[in-house]
Amino acid sequence: MKLKSLVILLVIIVSSCSNSVEYSEQFINETTGSYLFNQDEVIKVYYENNKLYLNWKGGVVEPVATGENEFFVADMYKKLHFVKHPETQKPYLSIISEDDESKITYDYLKAPKGYKTPSTHLKEGNYEKALAGYLEIKEQDSTSQYIREWDFNSMGYKHMRKREYDKAIRVLRLNAELHPNSANVYDSLGEAYLLNGDSLKAYDNYKKALEFNSTNRRAKDYVDSYAKKLSE
């Protein structure tokens, strides 16, 4: 174990036995909020009874405060502090380097008040805002784990199994916007429309699926059957 890691552990032990840090009202107001941990996750910073807490990855974390503007997060095994970028004046959560504590990095940008991640918008049924967020992620990284076709497809089928066809269609339409060249996306969307009683849109999407995969037997059978009905 590195010497600095041992020092961090000693600091934690000493700090846990000492009096808690007294945060100023100004400091609390300036640092409370959400910080962008990655493309679709945030670290929420808040205070209760003059104690600092984080809400991260769906759980509440109580860091060990080693000063008003320095704390250790065991779940991350990192020391953090709040900083402002000297040029933009934007606030960040910054990781304190074990090797050089004087080095300042700008790791987690503070999000605007009321900011919601794309996945939060999706859960709340704000599909347009969710799509806008996911498209922004795609623009930054087209291979991001947060826009995987399979995940949205699975979500769509989960709604279908619950007979929540409107929700399934909205999710699968979002998936089609993100993956417009996927036969599987249109095949799933066609099925959702069919289950929802919209045979025309089912036809349109199965036909689209065939454009990308002409061997899709289910799509071909439906398109042929529907076209035959139209010609009768």
Image (tube, rainbow, N blue to C red):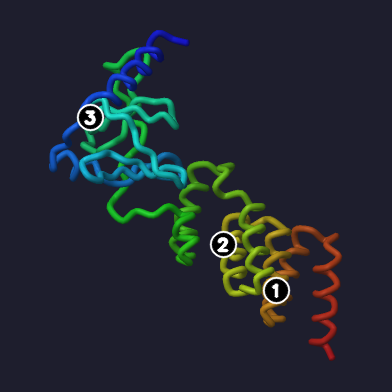
At 69% from the left and 56% from the top, the residue drawn is 182
Circle 1 crowding by C-alpha within 10 Å: few under 14, some 14–19, many from 20: some
Sequence-wise, the earlier of marks 2 and 1 is: 2
**Which residue carries the number 3 mark?**
69
| Coordinates of residue 56 in the picture (x, y in percent) | 42, 42
The residue most toward the front is 17
Residue 192 screen position, x and y as percent: 68, 71
Mark 1 or mark 3: whose residue is earlier in sequence = 3
Q: Is residue 35 left or right of residue 229?
A: left
User: Considering depth in this image, is 6 or 127 the residue closer to the camera?
Assistant: 6
Q: Nearer the viewer, mark 1 or mark 3?
A: 3
What amino acid is labelled 2 in the image? Leu
Q: Amino acid at mark 3?
A: Asn
Q: Quadrant of the C terminus?
A: bottom right
Q: Is any part of residue 86 visible from this angle?
A: no
**What's the distance in space between the residues labelled 2 and 3, CA to CA?**
41 Å
Who's the residue at 28% across and 45% down the image? Answer: 46
Q: Residue at x 20, y 28 (%)?
A: 19
Say which element carries label 1: helix
